[in-house]
Image (cartoon, rainbow, N blue to C red):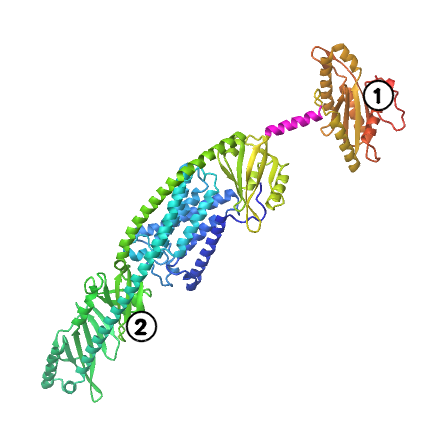
Amino acid sequence: MREPFGMKLPASGLIGWGIVAVAAVVMTGWLLREPAILRAVPGTLMVFNTALCFALAGLALGAEGLVPEARLQRLRTVLGTVLILVSALVLAEYLSGRSLGIDWPQLHRWLTDDNPHPGRMAAPAAAAFMCVGAALVLLHRVRAAWQGVAVQGLALATVTLAAIGIAGQALRFALIFADYPFGPMALHTAAGFVALSVALWLCARRMAWYRSRTVIEREDRRIAAAGAGILALIVCAYAIGAFAVTMHQLEDFARSNLLAQVNGRVDSFRTTVEYRTTRAAVVATRPAIAANLAALQGRPDDAAARRALQAEADSALQFGFSGIAFHGLHGARHAAAGRQLEVPALVLPIAGAHRSALLWDDGFVLYDRVTVSLNGEPVGVVVSEQRLEALTRALGNADDFAASAEIVVCRRLAMELDCVRQRPAPSAFQTAFSDAMPMAHALAGEQGVAVGRDYRERFVIAAYAPIGATGLAMVIKMDTAELYAPVRRQLLAAVLLLVVLAALGAWLLRLRVAPLVRRLAADEERLSLALDGSRLALWDFDVRSGRIYLDEQWSALLGKAPAAVSHTPPELEALVHPDDLPALRRHLQEVLEGKATHYDIEHRVRKPSGDWMWIRSRGRVVARDGRGRALRLAGTNADIEHRKRLELELAHQAGHDALSGLPNRNLFHDRMQRAIARSRRNRTLMAAMYLDIDRFKRINDSFGHDAGDALIRGFAKRLNQCIRDTDTAARLGGDEFAVILEALDDRAAGERIAGKIVAAMRAEFDLGEHRLAISTSLGVAFYQGEEESEAAGILKAADEALYRAKAAGRDTWRACMDGAPPAAPDQRP
């Protein structure tokens, strides 16, 4: 059977090309730097390497039906090996903590993402691609049961990793579990792996090894496993929905709480800084300080002015200044009080009219440098520092609402952040700036709440806001693992409950289904025994996939070991006899198009031994689509070799003489009519001959009928040896024979054959106990289609020529001559 023209690709091929198309769009987005393409699906981005691996896997699946089987196997082996190598390198990067240069980071850095390693695919995605690659390599190499189980296990592992990825996206496992090992997987990446798993399963189903090498062989266990899987999916969907709602409510609460916290603390921070900055500015406006600095500007050794400034400095300590100094315009210090920081741990400049900064020295210190003016002219500088202990204590109380809560105040310097944090211990630190950080939004003047990674590479929920116009920003954050701790505990309990429910459901389902399955198995066994007894081989033609499935009996019919097999139509056509193939194709097309209701044809197939065997193939269309196109045919193949042999023997016996084996009178006259028609149509020369054994009755009477029969057989054999394969020799009865010669070049050719026959019969015949020399007489008549002659007329002319040969003394031949009188009847013995 041949695949009809225009047949669609198998479903696995369509899935493969769909995956290739999506992967091509993603790769184009990275190459053209189009964020709208890459962010079409919300959530984690699919990196370039992931899209490339999807394209390779999709190509391996989509090539089915487009390339020959041998090339398809090689293509899948090569592409599967590439997937394994790429995945192994990615996993090696995760295990070693080093980059191996395969992530294309320069292609990804332009787009902000929470991936700490730009361009690196997620670890579960790499593991899934390794499973897909191994399955592609093994798919056409299954020779043992464990290999078939391995292919199906790899497909199951792929869909499991995809399910974990989908569940991880829905429930955001990376936020719930602090040390989540799988990392984020893009939603469309997980969907792609589900599609790959389905396509691999469809490919495996079309393989001959599938039925005998399934993971679960017993049907009742398969049904129970399928039921358990469906039950687990339902419970999972319900649990995911419930937990997603809970997480959403919990996150909303945390967002509002953190936003209120950051707003309150930012207001307190800003008010404190502004108040203390104003206090420093007020000191610089006191007239006495300006007058004394002006006096020292003209008379640097004015002791009274110095004493007055020192008194001002000492009194300032009573108003919260930890250190203060009065300087001249050229930097000379005239008076100072308290302790000023020499090398602070961190300096955070504050935007404003004065030179101000926040210093860190086990707490916040406000540094101000204010110019002192007299009558509009600068006369000196006041440098002051104020410890903001209340602000330090207030910011240190971050854990009053969460154990992992942390408050960070930062200022950006180029691509670095100078920051102060309160946990785990008050300290200053520097970290690299990233647009993905919540702090980046705050420094840009924005206010809000975001979920992402912090400088520790941990997932946090963070509220951020700028601190007025100071150029500083504040972030209050807490670990999402702490936020979702109640969900995590409930989730673990739900997983345990899910396992128990799935196991219980599978057990109950198996308990109810097992008796039905056993009954069906018994019926199937009886049907199998009946089919074995009838030697019927079942076949099932899936028109869409172009695969024909044949049961074990088909292999047995061909003389091979019983085994279920799967073939394409061209593979089966190669077994059909060339003479039978056109009719088979024509009949199949009529059935597929609905012009014939049933498929029923007899034809020959070649066995492995090289012998031809007759079969009868019967079936019908069992499924059509909405447009009436055939989707599936099913039927049986029956061995009819014995019946055909009997039919041929009966046909041979009906048309042949039992003694000589030559065609009999009926078959001779049929062939004579056909020869005349061909001669008339093609204007070719033909001849008809009549001949008999001279004095045969005397031989029969003298030597007996057994000798006569032996002579007839020997005569027929020599007669056949004298003519061509295209000619016909027949026994009409007794010792009478006839010959038809077709497509003669001229009359001389026919006359030569006539002479050859007469001469051949002169040699002695070995009749067992006797050796006998005989002769024959022969008459020949020619016909070239010019006249409307009938077979009877031509044969009558040949008979008349035979009379003339007899009259000429026998052991000779004569041709019919136009106008010659027929011989007298008594001249023929």
Q: Along the polypeptide, which appears first: circle 2 or circle 1?
A: 2
Q: Quadrant of the N terminus?
A: top right
Q: Quadrant of the C terminus?
A: top right
Residue 500, position as x, y percentages in the image = 31, 46
Residue 569 falls in image quadrant = top right
Q: Report the side of 732 relative to 522 (left or right).
A: right
> Is 554 situated above or below 97?
above
Say which of 689 and 538 sits in front. 538
Residue 642 within the magenta-colored segment of the rendering = yes
The reply to whether dot 2 and dot 1 touch (C-beta < 8 Å) is no
Tell me where the magenta segment starts and ends, as one range.
641-656
> Is 522 situated above or below 401?
above
Say which of 140 and 235 sits in front. 235
Q: Badge 1 is on which residue?
A: 805
> Is 163 situated above or below 29?
above
- How many angstroms separate mark 2 from mark 1 (CA)? 130 Å
**Disc 2 marks which amino acid?**
Gly
Residue 346, position as x, y percentages in the image = 21, 68
Q: Residues within 10 Å of mark 1 (few under 14, many from 20)?
A: many
Magenta segment, principal secondary structure? helix
Q: Report the side of 37 relative to 601 (left or right).
A: left
Q: Badge 2 is on which residue?
A: 445
Residue 488 falls in image quadrant = bottom left
